[in-house]
Amino acid sequence: MSEFVYLYRGPATPPGSPQQMQERLQRWSAWFKEVEKMGHLVNLGHPLEQTGGGVVKDRSGNLSDGPYAETKDIVLGFSIIKAKDLQEAAKLVKGHPIFDQGGLIEVRPIKSM
């Protein structure tokens, strides 16, 4: 089995009511539990802050914005899973609740070192 990173991309979902936030959290938790039960979850990962980041483009260490062309390009968080190949890793995202929010999941293989 190989490891893959899921990069969750999309517009930041507005907080909504406490009930809506709780429902979203429950859907995400249920999806993660299912993937874990199947033996594919390596690291649950974490959501990323939507402010306070940037890109270092050279050795100066200075942060700059972007290069984000659109809001949908923002990485909201990540997880690490294991699968036999890229196709299986892609199929595992079926039913993920991020699609209900207009987001997408970038699936990338992690290179073994």
Image (spheres, rainbow, N blue to C red):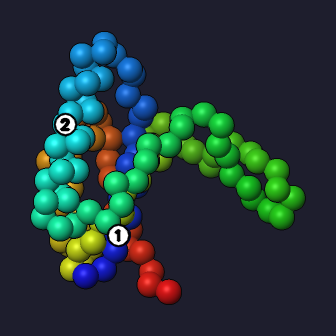
Q: How far apart are marks 1 and 2 (CA)?
A: 22 Å
85, above or below 81, in the image: below
Identify the residue under disc 1. 4
The quadrant in which the N terminus is found is: bottom left
Dot 2 lies on which element? helix
Q: Position of residue 92 (x, y in %)?
A: 18, 61
Identify the residue under disc 2. 27
**Comes first in the chain, label 1 or label 2:** 1
Q: Is 50 in front, or is 74?
A: 50
Q: Position of residue 32 (x, y in %)?
A: 22, 50
The residue at 82%/50% (across/down) is 62
Q: Where is residue 85 in the image (x, y as percent from the top left)?
A: 24, 78
Q: Where is residue 56 in the image (x, y as percent from the top left)?
A: 74, 55
Mark 1 packing: few (<14 Cα in 10 Å), some, or many (20+)? many
Farthest residue, direction top: 17
Please say if the residues under marks 1 and 2 sit with CB atoms less than 8 Å apart. Answer: no
Which residue type does callout 2 highlight? Answer: Arg
